[in-house]
Amino acid sequence: QERLKAFGKDSDFAPKHVHVVGAGVMGGDIAAVCALRGMRVTLQDQSVERIAPAIQRAAKLFERRYKGDARQVRFALDRLIPDPQGQGVPRADLIIEAIFENLEVKRSLFADLERRAKPEAVLATNTSSLRLEDIATVLQDPSRLVGIHFFNPVPMLPLVEVVQGEATDAAVLRRATGFVRAIDKLPLPVKSAPGFLVNAVLGPYMLEALRCVEEGRSPETVDAALVRFGMPIGPVELVDTVGLDIAVAAGKALAGEGATPPQRLLRLVEEGRLGRKSGEGYYRWVDGKAQKGE
Ligand code: NAI
């Protein structure tokens, strides 16, 4: 009840400056959506070569949304600043982490962010499968950490889960919720439990689809069946879109370390075939489209 009340009175927090760490599939698009809504955004990545493609993707989004209004596109691009060294951290009102799904890597990043960020800045993670409590142990003040869990593709999907860890401060939650509304998305309050809400439901669905493929049906057949049923995208194509490495991590979080993921999924990950982002997974991907056979 307390939690619902907290969410009932959203703050109108609209950060002026958002710093995003990780310019991959998620971080790049999160940064773009914030810039689209008028926020100043600094985008950091340890691999500097990840930043330019993210900005190119953002430029395409701005062109579509501003319907070719070159001035608006330029303003939005000016708001989105490549920041390989993380110089935006001390100035940001909100810092969103979207780096590899690895607890130790996230922990060391957050320890550093807390030291360098403004004391009132909100620290947020986009993790899909790690417990907030496990990340927050490195923080002097664990109540500052909140989950802001976007879905892929970020520009298209309106729902964002706002994740409350055991220690998360109610005011931080309200600010995170206010931010989600400020970027015109729908905040869904969830507790820090495996899969939160959406992936707890979607995970077993995608897993069953991969099992069908394991048993000999083609990805095309499985996907066509679910699309004809009414889903906007087939479950195997969805796994490719999410990223096969992310799917394995999320599967472990949902089903426990002892669970055995489908063999083909593990093999593809070992081969570096991670889905759309690497150009191949269950499908081959060309220009952002899965290449489907008959
Ligand atoms: P990705 O692999 O596409 O991008 C991660 C980026 O983080 C890479 O560019 C990498 O160079 C950078 N990075 C790694 N460690 C870093 C560090 N210490 N400092 C700076 N940059 C660093 O990964 P993706 O798919 O964007 O996932 C990122 C996070 O978002 C993960 O926590 C994942 O669980 C979560 N997520 C992913 C979704 C998906 O559909 N892929 C959906 C929702 C959440």
Image: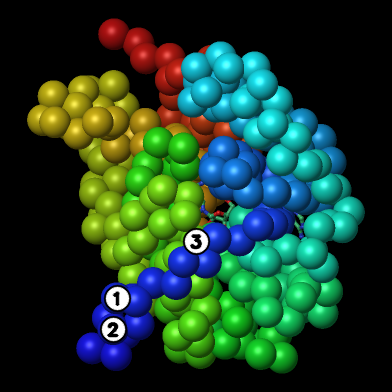
Which disc is residue 8 wearing?
1
Image vertical order of residue 14 relative to residue 285, above or below: below
Confirm or deny contact between disc 2 and disc 1 (CB under 8 A). Answer: yes
Task: Give the residue at x 70% y 49%.
Answer: 41
Q: What numbered label is drawn on residue 179?
A: 3
Label 1 SS: helix
The amino acid type of the residue labelled 2 equals: Lys
Tell which of 126 and 130 is nearer to you.
126
221 relative position to 40: left or right = left
* Farthest left residue in view: 229
Disc 1 marks a residue whose amino acid type is Gly
Q: Residue at x 47, y 55 (%)?
A: 182
Marks counted in the figure total 3
At a point 63% along the width and 49% down the height, the residue shown is 39
The answer to whether one can see residue 68 in this image is yes
How far apart marks 2 and 1 lie (CA) works out to: 5 Å
Which residue does the numbered mark 2 point to in the structure image?
A: 5
| 209 shown above or below 113 | above
Point out residue 236 in the picture as x, y percentages from the top left corner. Answer: 34, 34
Q: Nearer the viewer, residue 265 or 52?
A: 52
Q: How is the image coloured?
A: rainbow
The percent coordinates of residue 49 (x first, y second) are 81, 35
Residue 222: x %, y % from top left: 23, 29
Disc on the earlier residue, 1 or 3: 1
